[in-house]
Image (cartoon, rainbow, N blue to C red):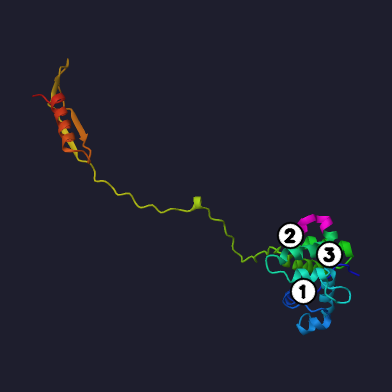
Amino acid sequence: MASHPYISGSGNITQMIGFLRKNFPATVTSETVKKYQLAPNNESYVINALQFIKVIDEEGKRTKAGHDVLVLPDGEFEAGFQRLVKEAYSDLFEHFSDEAWSLPKPKLVGYFRTADKTSEVIGGRQASVFQAFAALSGFEQAQSKPYNGTKTKPVSNSSKQVKSKPARSKEPAPQIEVSAPMATVASPKKDMALTVRIEINLPAEGSQETYDNIFRSIRANLLNE
């Protein structure tokens, strides 16, 4: 016989704890579970789970420790409920320490099957009951999201493409061609005429003074007076 509690629907235990937090009668039996319309034909499994964490005793009477925890407000209840669960599952916590709270279900199933020599189905139900207790203790189990057939890649700020405004094109700077007088170069065979053409690109953003200085330099250095 399994020493750890199990049930086909662990949500029934969670709901029962919720009802008892609102109204905890002196005695809780299968008839009490029936009144809340929980776990039809499986009421005894809910009672067994409550007895396992010692919220009620073997006769169904509420315990002082159980009552003191269940009347605690949210924010304090979780820590108190942790103590009840940790004491009840002392063998599990001796084996895994506080890591037991967040163990994946397959690992819990393996532990309970080994400890109680149960089938895979019963081991899965035992794991579900413990996870329900862990959730009430403030340890929510991570739920994996179903695969929708598409792969998504995380987008980082550095990989985002930033659209930049096209740069405004500047009007081409005016071009001036300056022709120097022809120079005659003596040659043993014949005279050869040489024309020197100088092309100057004036800066578009230049001032009138800049232009004047350029032409003044051309006149002084390249052109004959």
Q: Position of residue 67 (x, y in %)?
A: 78, 72
Nearer the N terminus, badge 3 or badge 2?
3
Q: Is residue 40 visible?
A: no
Q: Secondary structure of the magenta portion, mostly?
A: helix
Q: The residue tagged with tag 2: helix, strand or loop?
A: helix
Report if the CB atoms under discs 3 and 2 are less than 8 Å apart: no
| Amino acid type for the residue under numbered disc 2 | Ser
Q: Residue at the left extreme?
A: 225
Label 1: how many Cα within 10 Å (few below 14, some 14–19, many 20+): many
Q: The residue tagged with tag 1: helix, strand or loop?
A: helix
Foreground of the two, 92 or 83: 83
- The span picked out in magenta is 93-102
Q: The residue tagged with tag 3: helix, strand or loop?
A: helix
The disc placed on residue 118 is none
Nearer the N terminus, badge 2 or badge 1?
1
The disc placed on residue 88 is 3
* Residue pictured at 33% horizontal, 49% vertical: 167
Q: Which residue is mark 2?
A: 102
* Residue pictured at 74% horizontal, 60% vertical: 102
| Amino acid type for the residue under numbered disc 1 | Ile
